[in-house]
Each structure stands twice: as structure tokens, then as C-alpha cells.
Image: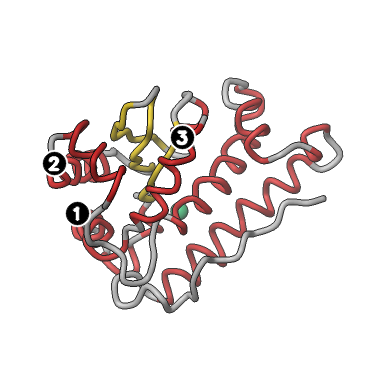
């Protein structure tokens, strides 16, 4: 059973004007699809082809000879997680247990946002900024290229893609403006709260 591009959780125009239809047409339909296609071609006829995506990511993460498989598998996973980290009319403030734990671990939601902004803007070159649960504590981390916190024993709650292809059509070189918009207009706190609840149930 080949891997398939998961459906977007909203229409390609649903994040306008903050993330354009044109960006989704390239980023989802071209880039994300290419990672899926590449992964299928790379694992074809190997034992990995029958394994779940997360298993492939974990099993290839430290194997330099499998870097191509890891990079494409992790990018498939990271992008699906990224689409779910946003929603139409997102932004606002976290509530409930998530708000409580952000306040506890970062001091305030604004301090969390500042840490996330620094991680996202400060990632040199391509990569990702994440809010993760790490042994019960919330942390902001950043990863380079395809790297993903799920190989580090961390449970992702949110991510922002800071590869140039995520924002260049809409924001050109202005990554800080894109990250600001992500946090204020797009972020899906409900998704983060659900992920935190799952993390706590483990
Ligand atoms: Mn991307």
C-alpha cells in the first residue's frame, strides 16, 4: 500500500489572505506531493514499504545511508502536521489545560510567542519551529531541513514550516512577517490542545 498525500483539513483558499491559494497550490499540491512520491519510489520493493510512516522515520533517522528515505518520510509527516497546525480564522489565545501549561512553562502566552518567533526566525536556512511536550514540560525547539522532534522523544503540539517555499510567494524574504501572521492569524490552538491531551494520556 503506497503512501498517499493526506487531504488538506480545509480548502486551498481557506487561509486567505494570510496564506494564499497560490502558496497552497505549490506547497501542498507540489512540494508535499513530491515528498510522498519520492518516498514511495525510495521504499518500493523494500521491507520499509509495509511499515507505518512514523516507524520509517524512527528507523532511518540515524542511518546516513538512508538519508533520502528519512528526509522524504519526515517531510511527509512534518507537512501533514503543519497543515493541521493552522486553521481558517485561527490565532487568538489558547484555553484550558494548554493555556495553563503554557503559562506555567513559559511565564505567559506572550513569552511563549516570543520564544517561538525567535526559534522560527532564527533557524538559519530551511527548517521548522515547534512547540513540543518533552517529558511533561512544554518547550520550543527548532529543527533543520527535514528533522523532526518525534525522533527525539518529544511530542509535537504545533509546528511552523520556515522553508522559504512556505512563505516566499506571499511574504518574499520577510520571514518575521510570516511567523507573526502564523501566530496571530493562523495557529490552531485546538489542534495543540488535542495533542497535549494525547501526550498526557501516554
Ligand atoms: Mn514545506
Q: Which mark is residue 176?
A: 1
Discs 1, 3 touching: Cβ within 8 Å: no
Relative to 110, say whether 65 is above or below. above
- Measured as percent of width and height from the top left, residue 12 is found at 48, 75
- Measured as percent of width and height from the top left, residue 172 is found at 27, 64
- Measured as percent of width and height from the top left, residue 63 is found at 62, 21
Query: Which residue position holds label 2?
Result: 108
Residue lying at 48% horizontally and 63% vertically, measured from the top left: 27
Tell me how far mark 1 sits from mark 3, CA to CA: 30 Å
Q: Is mark 1 within 8 Å of ligand 1?
A: no
Query: Which residue position holds label 3?
Result: 199
Would you identify the image quadrant in which residue 68 lies? Answer: top right
The first of marks 1 and 3 along the sequence is: 1
Left or right placement of residue 135 versus residue 3 in this view? left
The first of marks 2 and 1 along the sequence is: 2
Q: Nearer the viewer, residue 90 or 174?
A: 90
**How does the figure colour the protein chain or chains?**
secondary structure
Amino acid at each position: 500500500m503506497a503512501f498517499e498525500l493526506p487531504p488538506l483539513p480545509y480548502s486551498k483558499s481557506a487561509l486567505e489572505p494570510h496564506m494564499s491559494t497560490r502558496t497552497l497550490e505549490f506547497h501542498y499540491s507540489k512540494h508535499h506531493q513530491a515528498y510522498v512520491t519520492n518516498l514511495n519510489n525510495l521504499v518500493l520493493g523494500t521491507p520499509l514499504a509495509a511499515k507505518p510512516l512514523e516507524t520509517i522515520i524512527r528507523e532511518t533517522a540515524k542511518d546516513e545511508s538512508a538519508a533520502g528515505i528519512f528526509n522524504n518520510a519526515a517531510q511527509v509527516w512534518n507537512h501533514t502536521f503543519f497543515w493541521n497546525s493552522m486553521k481558517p480564522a485561527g490565532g487568538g489565545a489558547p484555553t484550558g489545560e494548554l493555556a495553563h501549561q503554557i503559562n506555567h512553562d513559559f511565564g505567559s502566552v506572550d513569552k511563549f510567542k516570543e520564544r517561538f518567533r525567535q526559534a522560527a526566525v532564527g533557524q538559519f536556512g530551511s527548517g521548522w519551529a515547534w512547540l513540543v511536550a518533552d517529558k511533561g514540560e512544554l518547550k520550543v525547539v527548532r529543527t533543520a531541513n527535514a528533522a523532526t522532534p518525534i525522533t527525539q522523544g518529544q511530542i509535537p503540539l504545533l509546528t511552523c514550516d520556515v522553508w522559504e517555499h512556505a512563505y516566499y510567494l506571499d511574504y518574499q524574504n520577510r520571514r518575521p512577517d510570516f511567523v507573526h501572521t502564523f501566530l496571530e492569524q493562523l495557529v490552531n490552538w485546538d489542534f495543540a490542545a488535542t495533542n497535549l491531551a494525547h501526550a498526557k494520556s501516554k
